[in-house]
Amino acid sequence: MPRLILVRHGQSQWNLENRFTGWWDVDLTEKGEEEARAAGRLLAEKGLLPTVAFTSLQTRAIKTLHFALEAAGLLWIPETKDWRLNERHYGGLTGLNKAETAALHGDEQVKIWRRSFDTPPPVLEYGSAFDLSTDPRYAGIAVPQTESLKDTIARVLPYYEGSIVPHLRAGATVLVSAHGNSLRALVKHLSGISDAEITGLEIPTGQPIVYDLADDLAVLDRYYLSER
Ligand SMILES: O=C(O)[C@@H](CO)OP(=O)(O)O
């Protein structure tokens, strides 16, 4: 049976500091590293062994993948990194503290920036502190200045269809280590969640979410591995 396992990276330094992160490349905290190892131990314990892995170009997701695979004894499986699995770009909010921003602009406005389906945060100006458009890792890529969830879906889904689905069709157990909003994009698609309802979906750090799939990739079941 094809299986898709989604894991959001473990706690990052800016998760801890409550700062808008997006494409900024922050590292895992020690707690985040441990969450990633625990995810890998859980995969091994439940006998759910990925045969191929995908992650973003961001350190926190790459390291989560590696800590998890190491704990599961699977560091050797093939892995692919792609910017299309990156976190949603937080635009001009990148680096700001979430509570301070809510105090300034109000909870409602911040909720819209964080969770609305198609309202992007304000743009990040080229040349400003958190601009990554000249970072060598994004050479040849049109780095966005901001992204809504809708914009994120527009790059995550074609990548999923083109690069991940072929492995699932071949019966693989695929592990995707990514980010809160790039995974919300995938879950919205796979579970048929409406634009309105997706605003309420939160994905916890370091908790493997498993999709059991039929041969035609119809979703048979979705569950947190820790609950089975
Ligand atoms: O800061 C971010 O990039 C994301 C994930 O931590 O935050 P949010 O929960 O607001 O989507």
Image (cartoon, helix red, strand yellow):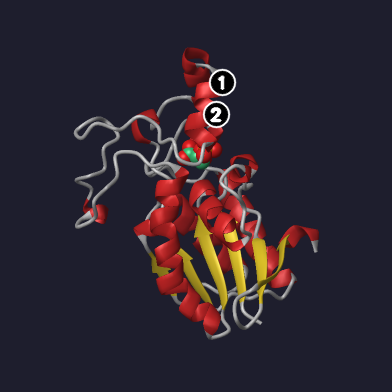
Quadrant location of the N terminus in the rendered image: bottom right
- Assess whether mark 2 and mark 1 are in contact (beta carbons under 8 angstroms): yes
Q: Residue furthest bottom?
A: 170
Instruction: Give coordinates of residue 195: x percent, y percent.
Output: 56, 46
In the image, residue 202 sits, relative to residue 193, either above or below, namely above
Q: Residue at x 50, y 41 (%)?
A: 117
Instruction: Give coordinates of residue 33: x percent, y percent.
Output: 56, 51
Note whether ligand 1 is within 8 Å of mark 2.
Answer: no
Pick the residue in front: 211 or 157. Answer: 157
Instruction: Give coordinates of residue 90: x percent, y percent.
Output: 40, 37
| Quarter of image, res 189 | bottom right
In the rendering, which numbered label is found on residue 111?
A: 2
Quadrant location of the C terminus in the rendered image: bottom right
Pick the residue in front: 117 or 165. Answer: 117
Q: Residue at x 74, y 70 (%)?
A: 45
In the image, residue 218 sits, relative to residue 96, either above or below, namely below
Q: Residue furthest top?
A: 104
Looking at the image, residue 21 sits to the left or right of residue 48; the answer is left
Residue 18 visible in the displayed image: no
In the rendering, which numbered label is found on residue 107?
A: 1
Q: Residue at x 57, y 49 (%)?
A: 10
Pick the residue in front: 155 or 203. Answer: 155
Amino acid carrying label 2: it is Lys
Q: Residues within 10 Å of mark 1 (few under 14, many from 20)?
A: some
In the image, residue 70 sits, relative to residue 88, either above or below, namely below
Q: Residue at x 51, y 53 (%)?
A: 185
Instruction: Give coordinates of residue 83: x percent, y percent.
Output: 35, 57
In the rendering, which numbered label is found on residue 171?
A: none
